[in-house]
Structures are given as structure tokens and as C-alpha cells.
Image: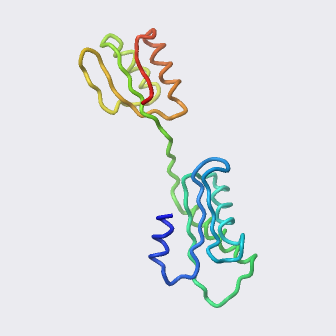
Amino acid sequence: MAFVEAVRERRRDARHHCFAWRLKQGDQGWRASDAGEPGGTAGMPILARIDGAELRGVVVVVTRYFGGTKLGKGGLIRAYGGAAAAVLDAGEVIEVHETRTVRIEHSYADQGAVQGVLRAHQLKPLGTHFDEGVSFRLRVPVEDVEKVLDAVRDATAGRVRGAPE
């Protein structure tokens, strides 16, 4: 809502700031607002364009100034949906994966095996601490946490201690 409010502040002279967002997969984490337009003519067409683009973590605000021409419900639906489609087509999609921090501890003898697993999964430690053994933290995509932990345990015959934080 802070983003929507910022748009409203920048465009105070506009009559409508209709919006929709989709934050999560499925029926969770979405909202649509017609912001004073007739019901179902603005927010839902914007949301439909977000869903059609299969995007998550997105908010779209369409600002409309009244120019004296009444569009009717069909015209409003086309205008809001079309504006949302245009902005989504023009934007750059940045893929972001949810991650979890994992802490791993191992002996110096297992350093090569552990590094091999990290390279295979394209992971880099956030910082490595060398003491009596080696310990580090890394960010792992949520869906890969158990796979990575299993791989380092397999590569070291179970000698590695690792767990999500």
C-alpha cells in the first residue's frame, strides 16, 4: 500500500488510482481495487493481466485522469487491462528465488568434497570461518535446502554437520 500511496501523492490531480497486486502463488496474497470506478472494471482487469503474465511479487497502479469522455464498463475494462498489459510488456522481469540460510561445519579433510557440492549447486559461502574445522553460512533456494544438505552428507560419508538456520 505504501507504493500505491506514493503514486497517489505524485498524481494528486488524477481522479482514479486503480491497482492490483499478486504477491504469492494461488489464491493467497492478492488484492485489487477499482478506486471509485464501477465494480469489476479496473482492479480485476489489472490483476488478470498480472496473472496472464504469470508474475508474482508485482503491483500495478493505473492512474486515470477524467477527460470528459465516458468510457462505459467495457471501455474501462479494456482501458485498465490494456494499460496494465502495456506496462508489464515494457518492464523487465527479474526472477527472484526465495532462499534460506544454511550453516555447514566440516573438517579440513572434507573441504574438497564440500566445495565440489557447492560448485555443482552453484552456491557460494557468505563467509568462511577457519578454526578447528571449517564453518560457513550460505543462502540456498528453499526448494533445494534438503537436496544440498543430503549432497554434502553423501559426499563426506555423513561427517558434515549442516542445518537450516
Q: Number of callouts in the render?
A: 0
Task: Judge left or right: residue 124 versus residue 7.
Answer: left
Residue in view at x 65 percent, y 61 percent: 47
Residue in view at x 60 percent, y 55 percent: 22
Q: Residue furthest bottom?
A: 68
Residue in view at x 44 percent, y 76 percent: 10
Q: Locate the C terminus by quadrant.
A: top left
Where is residue 48 drawn, in percent x and y? 68, 60
Q: Is residue 4 above or below residue 143?
A: below
Where is residue 127 drawn, in percent x and y? 30, 31
Q: Who is closer to the viewer here, 136 or 155?
A: 136
Where is residue 17 drawn, in percent x and y? 56, 74
Task: Judge left or right: residue 104 versus residue 49.
Answer: left
Q: Is residue 95 above or below residue 46?
A: above
Q: Residue furthest left?
A: 131
Q: Who is closer to the viewer here, 27 or 158?
A: 27
Quadrant of residue 155 in the image? top left
Task: Judge left or right: residue 149 versus residue 137.
Answer: right
